[in-house]
Amino acid sequence: MIKRNKLFGNQTRVTFCLPRDVPPGPVSVVGSFNGWQPGRHELVARRDGTRTVTVKLPPGEHRFRYLGSGGVWLDDESADQVDDAGSLLRL
């Protein structure tokens, strides 16, 4: 799940959210906004049974995927588009 909050100016706060245990182990959101670097934006467990990470993004298109332990890649069906290249956000 993806939550978007428009900030003052042209930035948008994007919160990426997954269930706490699916997939098991650490999960990072990697994408065009962080050079596809695993671990840079790792999701953190929350009390409500989810894990999240929030990133401030400028306007434009941003590709991303989730990377779980063991090299498991996941897409987010709540993205604006999902295709062979992964998930796409349009801000």
Image (tube, grey):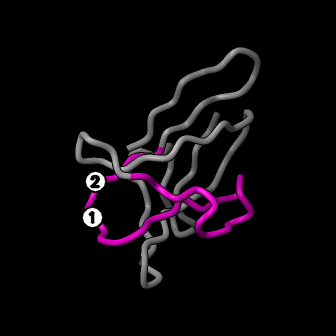
At a point 53% along the width and 63% down the height, the residue shown is 86
Q: Position of residue 90 (x, y in %)?
A: 62, 39
Which residue is farthest front?
47
Which residue is farthest top?
8
Helix, strand or loop at disc 2?
Answer: strand
Does the magenta-highlighted stretch encompass residue 24?
A: yes
Q: Is residue 72 above or below residue 42?
A: below
Quadrant containing the C terminus in the rendered view: top right
What is the magenta range?
Answer: 16-44
Mark 2 crowd level (few <14, some 14–19, many ≥20, 10 Å Cα): some
Mark 2: amino acid: Pro
At a point 52% along the width and 69% down the height, the residue shown is 84
Helix, strand or loop at disc 1?
Answer: loop
Does the magenta-highlighted stretch encompass residue 7?
A: no
In terms of image quadrants, where is residue 25?
Answer: bottom left
Q: Does 10 sit left or right of 81 as displayed?
A: right
Q: Is residue 84 above or below residue 55?
A: below
- Residue pointed to by mark 1: 22
CB atoms of marks 2 and 1 within 8 Å: yes
- Residue pointed to by mark 2: 19
Q: Position of residue 49 (x, y in %)?
A: 23, 47
Q: CA distance from mark 2 to mark 1?
A: 6 Å
Q: Does 75 sit left or right of 22 as displayed?
A: right
Which residue is farthest bottom?
70
